[in-house]
Image (cartoon, grey):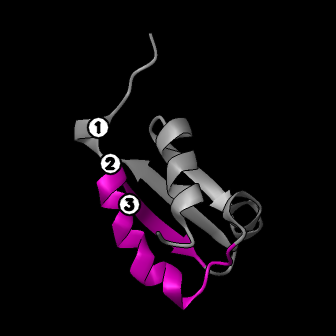
Amino acid sequence: MSKYTKLWNYLKDSCLGTETLTFDEIYSICGAYVDDSFMQAKHELENYGLSVVKINLRDRTVLFSRNASNMRYRR
């Protein structure tokens, strides 16, 4: 189990299209910082139907996206 598993589960349940989270929000969700291990662990998101689109170090944000084949639409 990755230290980011809580984050992946949060995104699986809440991300309907794209979602931007700050580094602080990520820490409050999973208790782990965005660091070098995040770069390796981000590939685990594919198992949740999600991906990392962009990591903005200046603004300290991460943009996540639901893969098109796994999109959930609001009715």
Q: Where is residue 42 in the image (x, y as percent from the top left)?
A: 42, 71
Q: Residue 36 carries which label?
A: none
Counting residues from the start of the chain, the first of labels 1 and 3 encountered is 3
State which quadrant residue 40 falls in.
bottom left
Q: How crowded is mark 1: few (under 14 residues within 10 Å), some or many (20 or more)?
A: few
Q: Under tag 3, what secondary structure? A: helix
Residue ID for mark 3: 45
Relative to residue 30, is residue 42 drawn left or right? left
Counting residues from the start of the chain, the first of labels 2 and 1 encountered is 2
Q: How far apart are marks 3 and 2 (CA)?
A: 6 Å
Q: Under tag 1, what secondary structure? A: helix
Query: Furthest residue to the top?
Result: 75
Name which residue type carries label 1.
Asn
Name which residue type carries label 2.
Gly
Residue ID for mark 2: 49
**11 in relation to 17, above or below:** below
Identity of the residue drawn at 52% across and 49% down:
9
Identity of the residue drawn at 60% across and 86% down:
35
Quadrant, the C terminus: top left
Query: Furthest residue to the front?
Result: 1
Q: Which mark is residue 70?
A: 1
**53 in relation to 71, above or below:** below
Magenta extent: 32-56
